[in-house]
Amino acid sequence: DVQLLESGGGLVQPGGSLRLSCAASGITFSTYGMSWVRQTPGKGLEWVSGFSGTGDYTFYADFVKGRFTISRDNSRNTLYLQMNSLRAEDTAIYYCTKAHASSGYYPFPFDYWGQGTLVTVSS
Amino acid sequence: SYELTQPPSVSVSPGQTAIITCSGDKLGDKYTFWYQQKPGQAPVLVMYQDIKRPSGIPGRFSGSNSGNTATLTISGTQAIDEADYYCQAWDNSVVFGGGTRLTVL
């Protein structure tokens, strides 16, 4: 079975940093696109960043460019999201997602999701 | 930036057909994807590339996309289909619709 297990969430002050991790199992991790998608409690979904299926290209939503960095370690089957200069509006559940086999070059659609890790930005 | 618009809510009686729409400029020129999310759970992909069902998704789910509107149709809706549904497309970035709460009365 495919499993995605996020960690690294927590409470951080505005302007602070956090690093999220996503440990994947049950897949040949290096061959799939991966993404981070967030959801504000009680609100909708918002894509944050992703890796191409080829693993050599990264995608970012405009609102995180320059603040967040996505990376992956294929030897550890782990996806990361380094989040700097955090703002109150970044408060959300962050989901790690795997791209469906049909995705080709793109990091979507998302056919497997982790259970999410909560990031709270507050003083 | 590109926007996808969904009705906030749709209600349907058990056994009837539920139709959830997603509107965007020339959306029919793009692929649309649909996700189902039940309370306290992560979303589940229920439709990809407009009309394709992932493995394990029941045949009562179908999709279409033309013009400015994509549609997710659930035939013979069951109580277990009650959930939030989100459409998604790509326009130089991943875009999600605001979500539609399907209530099975």
Image (cartoon, coloured by chain):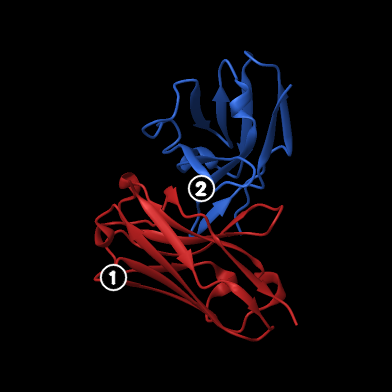
Q: Secondary structure at mark 1?
A: loop
Q: Secondary structure at mark 2?
A: strand
Chain rendered red:
A
The residue under the point 63% across, 23% down is B79
Q: Is residue A74 above or below residue B103?
A: below
Mark 2: few, some, or many residues within 10 Å (few <14, many ≥20)?
A: many
> Which amino acid, mark 1?
Arg
Q: Quadrant of residue A28?
A: bottom left
Mark 1: few, some, or many residues within 10 Å (few <14, many ≥20)?
A: few
> Which amino acid, mark 2?
Ala
Q: Position of residue A11 (x, y in %)?
A: 65, 76
The chain ID associated with circle 2 is B
Quadrant location, the C terminus of chain A: bottom right
Rendered hue of chain B is blue
Marks 2,1: beta carbons within 8 A? no
Q: Which mark is residue B86?
A: none
Gap in angstroms between the C-alphas marked 2 and 1: 31 Å
The residue under the point 56% across, 23% down is B74
Q: Quadrant of residue B76?
A: top right
Q: Position of residue B88 (x, y in %)?
A: 53, 46
Left or right: B11, with A96 as reference point = right
Q: Which mark is residue B89?
A: 2
Residue A13 vs residue B47, the one in the foreground: A13
Left or right: A82, with B96 as reference point = left
Q: Position of residue A109 (x, y in %)?
A: 43, 48
Q: Position of residue A33 (x, y in %)?
A: 34, 58
Residue receiving disc 1:
A76
The residue under the point 38% across, 68% down is A79
